[in-house]
Every structure is written in C-alpha cells, then in structure tokens.
Amino acid sequence: MPNAQQAYWQNGGVTPQKGKCKFATPCPAEVYRSRHFANMPDVSTNCMKTLQTLTFILALGLFSCNGKTESSATKNENVLSDTQVVVSIPDTIKKFVVDDYPVTNEMLADKASNNSSYKKQSGQTFSCDKAWFSNDTLKQTLVFELYTDYHRFVTYHFLDNDIPTDLINRMELHIGGGELASDKQKLKDFSGFLKQTTKINSSCFITDKGFRLGSTKQKAVETYGNPDKQTITDGIEKLEWLFIGDASYDAKADLKGKPLAANSFGHQILMYFRNGKLIGQILHNDIP
C-alpha cells in the first residue's frame, strides 16, 4: 500500500493535510456519542433512564457497524485499485526486442563511492546519473542515463564533431542549484563533457540490431517501419518512432499495425541523418 494510503489509515481515515473525514456517513460511535449525548439533560424517572440507555446502546451498535462496514468496503476498494490487471496479449500481435549496445552493467558500474564518478561538471553545467564513454579512433561518444539497477533509461550516441543540436537539447543536464540547464547553457558547456569520458572498445558502438553511425536511412525504415514523425532542420533529417510496451499495453490502445516492445513499458527511437547517413540516435526506455 502506498505511503499516502498508510498514513491515511494510521490517521483513522482522515487525510492529515486537509483534516477531512474519509467517510461521507456519520462519524464513528464514540464521536457521535460525545457530540449528541454529552449535554443531554438528566431525567428523574427510571423509565426515562431505561429508554435513554436502550437508545444509546442501539445508536452505538448502529454507528459502529456502519463504520466498520464502510471502512472494510473502502479498504477492499483500495486493495482492488492497487491490484494490477494482467492483460492477455493475443499471438496475432507481434513483439520485438528493443535495441541496445553491448556495454555491460559492470562497465556502467560507479567506480567511486556515492556515485561520484557519475557527477561531472563542464563550466556551469552538471551531468548526473549518466555514464559517458568514447572511442578516439571512431571519434564517437555514448552516454547512458541510468535508473535503478542499471536500467538504461536513455541512451545517446553521436559523432563528436557533428552533434545534432536537438540531441543536446534533449539531454537532461543541470546548473548549480539543481535546476535544469537551459538549451543555451548546455550548448555552451557540452564540449567539456567529451573530455571526461571513459575510453572503450569500438565494438561497443554497434547496437544489437547492427546499427552504427553511418548506417543508412533505408536500414532504419526496414527495421522499424515508417517513422511516426519526420522533420528536417539545418540539413539534418530526424526520424522518430514510438512503440507501446507489452508491460503497459491495456488491449485498448490502437497499435496502428505496429509491434509491441517486448519486456518494456514503452520505447522511443530518434535517429538523426545527414545525407542519408546516421550521425546520432537516442534510445528511450520508459519506466513504470
């Protein structure tokens, strides 16, 4: 149960921030009694005392039962809402394995304490939660933005001497106070990060599907189909594909004839081409 719900139940069904009662029905019996019986005038006859006692017992039982019933019903609703519905995916819907680079988790592992090797600074711009690799012969750079357990949230691959501005703009970098750096600030300081990379073998710059910088646009279309979006800026053609992941598919979304990304919550591919040749790409793997 989420923390907010735990705090809710520990607080007796009252939202701490707003102090409102969870239930729309009368409050529990103890509260009801204090509000409605505390100032009841005394009655001298035994008959009235007996009637008062019986009325109180009936009221106590009624409101206690109502409180327990609605509390139980509400808890059951919460349990149902927290239960993930498993969708059966028919065999007619195709799946594909998302692309990746042959960089191991051991290579991605932080080499210093407190993730300090992930923290880099260039000018007034900071890079966090990212592993930077390069190869001097290829003059290419790979950047992995990491999540829990080395999940490759976003992967960037580009030529050191022909980096698409859009690729840099899409990379999440920060300034001193932790705020996101502006596109202008990132462009100004980006080259400094290229001097702080870990050198790795050139074989790591070829994806599992055989893509490398220099691959053709035709290969991309043959692999992924026609792109969902296509734009040209300053002589660079950008193709974009969006795929729903099988882990998040609800059997209602229109797949438009496209396959599902296997073992994924969603997958996005951006490829940048100059003169029909790949000069950069971004692989984005959604998280739940």
Image (cartoon, rainbow, N blue to C red):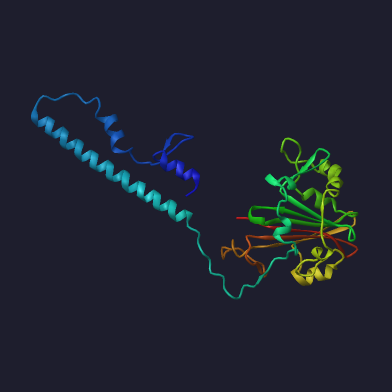
What residue is at 19 percent from the left and 38 percent from the top? 57
Quadrant position of the C terminus in the picture: bottom right
Asked if residue 205 is positioned above or below residue 39 in the image, the reply reads below
Relative to residue 149, is residue 232 drawn left or right?
A: right
Label tally? 0
Q: Residue furthest bottom?
A: 92
Residue 148 spot, x, y in % from top left? 63, 53
What residue is at 21 percent from the left and 26 percent from the top? 40
Residue 54 spot, x, y in % from top left? 16, 37
Asked if residue 272 is positioned above or below residue 35 in the image, the reply reads below
What residue is at 63 percent from the left and 62 percent from the top? 264
What residue is at 81 percent from the left and 38 percent from the top? 124
Asked if residue 104 is positioned above or below residue 130 in the image, the reply reads below
Q: Residue furthest left?
A: 46
Nearest the eye: 202 or 4? 202
Residue 154 spot, x, y in % from top left? 72, 55
Residue 100 spot, x, y in % from top left? 73, 64
Asked if residue 207 is positioned above or below residue 59 in the image, the reply reads below
Image-quadrant location for residue 105: bottom right
Nearest the eye: 140 or 1? 140
